[in-house]
């Protein structure tokens, strides 16, 4: 079940399987605020084990602020995957604007708050 995207600004970014795993673990460990329905949507990859995430603009800003706070605290340097975290930060900062029109084929991210 998708979400209508009429008159909504969305940020989009494609992530690899490794990056998606880290994103999921960060949500499971409560590092970042869980999205509510319609705030973080997923478009499955094309067989390359990647996915594109579509962030509702307000949620994107909340997520980015939380990410920057953790990043700036040096917490990522104390992990065994600092390079992946640094890459995720770069990807977030370079997320593209996307005017979706209808996004009925996209589903909510699997860890969406219920």
Image (spheres, helix red, strand yellow):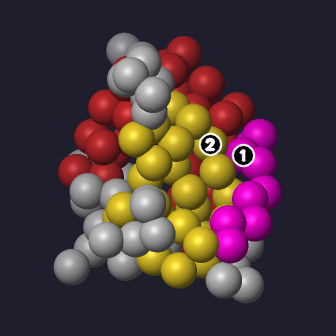
Give the residue pinned by disc 1.
95
- State which quadrant residue 55 falls in: bottom right
Give the residue pinned by disc 2.
13
**Crowd tier of the residue under label 2, counting other residues whose Cα lies within 10 Å: few below 14, some 14–19, many 20 or above:** some
> Can you name the residue that lies furthest to the bottom here?
7
Residue depicted at x 43% and y 53%: 42
Residue 90's x, y, as percent?
70, 32
Magenta stretch contains residue 107: no
* Nearer to us in this view, 76 or 51: 51
Residue 73's x, y, as percent?
57, 43
Image position of 34 (left or right of 9) = left
Residue 112's x, y, as percent?
30, 67
Residues drawn in magenta: 93-101
- Pick the quarter of the image with the C terminus: bottom left
Q: Secondary structure at mark 2?
A: strand
* Nearer to us in this view, 7 or 23: 7
Q: Do the CB atoms of the residues marked 1 and 2 lie less than 8 Å apart?
A: yes
Residue depicted at x 45% and y 28%: 46
């Amino acid at each position: 079940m998708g979400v209508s995207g009429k008159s909504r600004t969305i940020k989009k970014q494609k992530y690899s399987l490794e990056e998606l795993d880290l994103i999921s673990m960060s949500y499971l460990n409560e590092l970042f605020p869980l999205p509510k329905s319609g705030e973080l949507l997923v478009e499955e990859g094309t067989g390359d084990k990647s996915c594109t995430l579509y962030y509702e603009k307000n949620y994107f800003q909340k997520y980015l602020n939380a990410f920057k706070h953790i990043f700036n605290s040096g917490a990522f340097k104390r992990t065994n995957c600092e390079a992946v975290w640094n890459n995720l930060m770069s990807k977030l900062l370079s997320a593209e604007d996307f005017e979706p029109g209808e996004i009925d084929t996209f589903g909510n991210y699997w860890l969406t708050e219920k």
